[in-house]
């Protein structure tokens, strides 16, 4: 297939605007599946976590053939925390389908990726999806997209974008709202006519930049990228160069694959412009250049936005360590973290000053939470510290700066005052406030990233679960000073054993419990949230004293309020600086960093002296 018959496109959208569902329909209508083939819904979300959460975490490639033309499609993550995936992916494509919900319009993550795509000169096709919704407002959304493109600095060609109205779930797209609503042929034809074929030098020496690294049980390390120049042939000699020109590996191209539908298919040859996968290299990683020996200089590497959040990963040194997981040593944790940083360039790992601990930096709580959840499912035991923002010094003024975020909040009018009050306490500045229809108000804040740590659960409580918050990294701003943290203290176990129903019944008067009867507890474990400021040591294994007196009402049922069970992300956002989250394959527990109460008091005195 010649280069003129190839189109490379990315699909860009906010979380839950329907891009993976749309890709399902593109695959189905192009004949990528057999008529009787059983295909799971959201076929590209192959990762267990992606299926459970309903979000795309890893960028993936697929390919469809339409009227003799091959269209390589890259499904990009829709959450800002996984933006590092998106920034690399855009190098592989020549155009983008910008998918926007007909009711919600362009949201922050759409802005983030659209800005990156327009800056690279990609030609956009705008698809207003879910126009069959009752609250759809397609024309207003069209104007919002145009305003967004103009604000992002789009040139005249990009502002003259073609428009499609679609329903990804029903599998149709049309140029007008009153079209036949039959299939996606209008979208296929528009991709072929509007997106240019790759214009690359097929006669130059072979070279490609590694964009995606993943692991296959049979093939080992698999590197995916676009063939930027020349032709690739099986068994040809090649070398691997770092962005600074250092040669790290030489060898032969033992396995060359192209994408056909959902599968990677072995091929003997590929030419410039095609998206291919290469296996058999031991050292190559993202964003290295894989090329012929005669290639002298590496391909330019895409700069990636720096991490904004850091966490400390430690070995689990609690009393229950080693009972629930298989991988518990610092060496195993270190190897796993450094392997993750190879393939995911938005994550940085370095050894901590503390013994058997590692500093892991990323884009946000969700990205690091997904990494912890993956490690937990692989059998690791870890202790995780509180997230911290990564600050920097302004080179011109020397002032301290911290990462800022744009928070876009849709909330019922009745809860607007509560949200504005809480955001102002966290140093948020209200930038815009306007009605968004249906009795809701849209609030736009500029707020320090650390002000949003731990706020989402409180936000859902304040809005009775009806509020929607989207956030986007908005650069660095001046340090905003101290932000008030959690007001209430915790209930801390002062004994080892199993929690007793009788003891928990009397403890629930003191606050909200996190444990159930029969749960393993130990000294220093956080049992619940105190109803007052300050921590309180309590005994969760106290048993009822047995007597031979039988009084009326003596043995009335002791009813327990159901405990508050936290997810991993909620636990990470809840803890303070002197607390840790203990993560094992079987449980997520909250504990004090120092289990012994005397050690805690000494550490508290030291921190007060340092502050003074």
Image: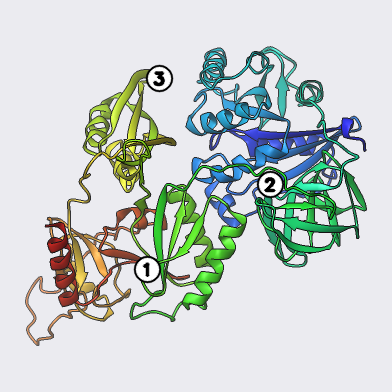
Query: Which circle, 1 or 3, is nearer the viewer?
Result: 1
Element at badge 3? strand
Q: What residue is shown with label 1?
A: 353
Mark 1 or mark 2, earlier in chain:
2
User: How far is disc 1 from disc 3 in space, using C-alphas?
Assistant: 49 Å
Residue 378 showing in the rendered view: no
Q: Position of residue 29 (x, y in %)?
A: 80, 34
| Crowd rating for badge 3 (residues with CA inside 10 Å; few <14, some 14–19, many 20+) | some
For the view shown, which residue lies furthest in the bottom direction?
548
User: How far is disc 2 from disc 3 in space, using C-alphas?
Assistant: 34 Å
Mark 1 or mark 3, earlier in chain:
1
Residue 468 sits in which quadrant? top left
Element at badge 2? strand
Q: Identify the residue at horizontal 86%, vertical 62% (top origin).
A: 254
Q: What residue is shown with label 2?
A: 60
Residue 216 showing in the rendered view: yes
Q: Identify the residue at horizontal 39%, vertical 32% (top origin).
A: 406
Q: What residue is shown with label 3?
A: 436
Residue 477 sits in which quadrant? top left
């Amino acid at each position: 297939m010649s280069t003129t018959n190839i189109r490379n496109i990315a699909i860009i959208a906010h979380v839950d605007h329907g891009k993976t569902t749309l890709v399902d329909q593109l695959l189905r209508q192009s004949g990528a599946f057999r008529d009787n083939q059983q295909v799971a819904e959201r076929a590209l979300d192959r990762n267990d976590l992606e299926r459970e959460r309903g979000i795309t975490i890893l960028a993936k490639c697929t390919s469809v053939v339409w009227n003799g033309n091959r269209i390589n499609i890259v499904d990009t993550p829709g959450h800002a925390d996984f933006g590092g995936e998106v920034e690399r992916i855009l190098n592989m494509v020549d155009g983008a389908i910008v998918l926007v919900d007909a009711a919600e319009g362009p949201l922050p993550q759409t802005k983030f990726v659209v800005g990156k795509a327009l800056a690279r000169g990609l030609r956009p096709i705008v698809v207003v999806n879910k126009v069959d919704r009752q609250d759809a407002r397609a024309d207003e959304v069209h104007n919002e997209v145009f305003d967004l493109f103009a604000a992002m600095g789009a040139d005249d060609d990009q502002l003259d974008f073609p428009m499609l109205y679609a329903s990804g779930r029903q599998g149709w797209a049309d140029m007008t709202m009153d079209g036949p609503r039959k299939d996606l042929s209008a979208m296929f034809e528009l991709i072929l006519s509007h997106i240019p074929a790759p214009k690359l030098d097929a006669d130059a020496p072979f070279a490609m930049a590694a964009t995606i690294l993943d692991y296959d049980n049979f093939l080992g390390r698999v590197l995916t990228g676009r063939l930027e120049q020349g032709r690739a042939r099986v068994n040809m000699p090649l070398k691997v160069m770092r962005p600074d020109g250092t040669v790290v590996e030489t060898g032969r191209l033992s396995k060359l694959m192209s994408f056909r539908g959902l599968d990677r298919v072995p091929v003997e040859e590929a030419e410039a412009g095609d998206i291919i996968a290469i296996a058999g290299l031991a050292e190559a990683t993202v964003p290295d250049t894989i090329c012929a020996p005669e290639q002298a200089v590496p391909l330019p590497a895409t700069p990636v936005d720096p991490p904004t959040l850091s966490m400390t990963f430690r070995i689990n040194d609690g009393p229950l360590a080693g009972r629930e997981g298989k991988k518990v040593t610092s060496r195993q944790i270190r190897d796993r973290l450094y392997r993750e940083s190879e393939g995911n360039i938005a994550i940085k790992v370095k050894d901590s000053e503390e013994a058997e601990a590692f500093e892991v930096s990323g884009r946000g709580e969700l990205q690091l939470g997904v990494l912890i959840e993956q490690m937990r499912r692989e059998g690791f035991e870890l202790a995780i510290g509180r997230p911290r923002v990564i600050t920097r010094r302004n080179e011109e003024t020397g002032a301290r700066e911290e990462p800022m975020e744009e928070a876009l909040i849709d909330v019922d009018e009745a809860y607007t005052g509560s949200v504005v009050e809480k955001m102002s306490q966290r140093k948020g500045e209200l930038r815009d406030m306007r009605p968004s229809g249906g009795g809701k108000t849209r609030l736009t804040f500029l707020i320090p990233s650390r002000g949003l740590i731990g706020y989402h659960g409180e936000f859902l409580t304040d809005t009775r679960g009806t509020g929607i918050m989207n956030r986007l990294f908005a650069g660095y701003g001046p340090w905003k000073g101290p932000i008030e943290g959690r007001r209430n203290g915790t209930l801390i176990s002062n004994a080892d054993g199993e929690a007793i129903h009788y003891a928990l019944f009397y403890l629930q008067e003191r606050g909200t419990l996190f444990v159930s009867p029969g749960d393993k507890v130990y000294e220093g474990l956080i049992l619940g949230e105190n109803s007052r400021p300050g921590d309180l040591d309590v005994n969760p294994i106290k048993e009822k004293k047995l007597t031979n007196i039988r009084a009326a009402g003596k043995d009335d049922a002791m009813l327990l309020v159901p405990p508050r069970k936290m997810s991993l992300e909620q636990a990470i956002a809840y803890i303070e600086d002197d607390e840790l989250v203990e993560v094992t394959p079987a449980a997520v527990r909250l504990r004090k960093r120092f289990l012994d109460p005397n050690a805690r008091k000494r550490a508290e005195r030291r921190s007060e002296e340092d502050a003074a």
